[in-house]
Image (spheres, helix red, strand yellow):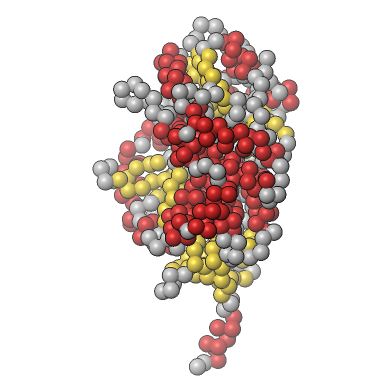
Amino acid sequence: MSVSGDIERMNQPATETADVVLIGAGVMSATLAVLLKELDPEAKVEIVEQLDGAASESSFAWNNAGTGHAALCELNYTPRNKDGSISIEKAVRINTSFEESKQFWSYLIEQGAIESARRFLNPVPHMSFVRGAKDVEFLRKRFETMSAHPCFADMRYSESPEQIGEWAPLLMRGRKDGEPIAATRVDQGTDVDFGALTRQLLRHLGSLGGARVSYKQRVVSLEREASGDWLIELDVDHGKRSRQLRARFVFVGAGGGALPLLQKSGIPEAQGYAGFPVSGQWLRCDDPQLVAQHKAKVYSQASVGAPPMSVPHLDTRVVDGRSSLLFGPFAGFTTKFLKTGSPLDLPLSVRPDNLRPMLSVARDNFSLVKYLVGQVLQTPKQRIEALRDFFPEAREEDWRLEIAGQRVQIIKRDAKRGGKLEFGTELVTAADGSLAALLGASPGASTAVSTMLQLIERCFPERYQSEAWQARLGAIFTARAGQLAQDGKRLAEVRERTHRVLELAPQPAQV
């Protein structure tokens, strides 16, 4: 054996091992890591993050709207059927998924694992607001259908300018009389600082034996070995050294960066997936006098051709104990998959297996392309004019531009059209359950707990069904989403407990 060969082996980093490696230190990885440690306290778990801190991309407070998505106000979750009826199946699913999130957070607070919910969760009413006879008729039917279901029994509806003005004064101030308007309101909506939540979860994780979070560690390669384990090559601290990490299970929870990592894995299930990056911007107001006059998250209808993630809304936002107002989002286009990413992210993600789906989506979504071009070319004055549809007396000098995070929408194969563009989230898992990746965007973080429970059931099927794991899950979740959707009494009991623990008392409407 040559001396040079001996030296080469001596310079190679020793391979470390873990049971579970999670890529990305955002709310998804933090949620999954804590859940797995609850189920298996002996598991060796590590999160690796390429940036120098937690929740620095999509989970960062100002990179998202902070809406606790429970389908209380988001009109795109309740589409109109061909016969004119309103479909609420997706809304019920999202609502009960958020109830699972609240149960998980309540359990952790009761166990002393995380601090008071006020560090990351605040009660903010959720409203829908529409103008014009057609949209008023839609909202009325939506209310009639939704309020008949226990999940939405507390929803209120009004076409009265006076009542809507009491619920959200800025909406009506300066608005011309005569135009048909309507609004719904649910008092027990929420604003969530997912960055603060992530940091609390990771702080708790770090206090547990056999768990750690490692920063400034970029995944260079991800290869499956003959044993079925995964070998992860890491670039540490911007090339100062390298590291090898072997794991039995890998979760790719890197937000917009998940697609390239999924492609690195080479699993057949990744074939055909591509990503469509959309950037975002907000108008932000910190004026205490204006902020004090709007206590709600108010959603309306998306413009024709706009993606669902661009549904306009005027929101109360609470970050580090201070309230602000956000309006938007205004969409844009960039080839980056992450806010801190590279312009080469999109072109480098193109593969022979996803080229046809991408071209098909480009062919079938001209209206979306036209919309994005229009958004990119918007002037500050045009953004303020869009805000005035909500707040007629808005002044340009009270608002400033805030750059939001990147969203990479899913493109996947479609037998009929060649490819289709989706705006939700999707879990992609290897056939043997050794790797999973989360793609997509909204409702995302709000339903992280439900999504991670689905992942655990899919990737650890035998252990998930075991008596020990079912007992531990039963201690955390007194009722799962499916039961809550069918049992109004059980739903009321669960909400009473979680709202007490999470300090979510109903908020009175302002007068």
Can residue 417 be seen?
yes
Residue 370 picture quarter: top left
| Frontmost residue, 225 versus 103 | 103
Tell me the residue at 39%/25% (across/down).
86
Can residue 345 be seen?
no
| Frontmost residue, 108 versus 470 | 470
Tell me the residue at 43%/47% (across/down).
426
| Frontmost residue, 464 versus 183 | 464
Relative height, residue 251 to residue 336 (above, below):
below
Q: Position of residue 166 (x, y in %)?
A: 63, 15
- Location of the C terminus by quadrant is top right
Q: Position of residue 177 (x, y in %)?
A: 54, 6
Relative height, residue 10 to residue 184 (above, below):
below
For the view shown, which residue lies furthest in the bottom direction? 1
For the view shown, which residue lies furthest in the top direction? 178
Residue 495 picture quarter: top right
Tell me the residue at 65%/19% (across/down).
509
Q: Position of residue 209 (x, y in %)?
A: 66, 64
Q: How many marks?
A: 0
Q: Position of residue 491 (x, y in %)?
A: 53, 34
| Frontmost residue, 432 versus 213 | 432
Tell me the residue at 49%/67% (across/down).
248
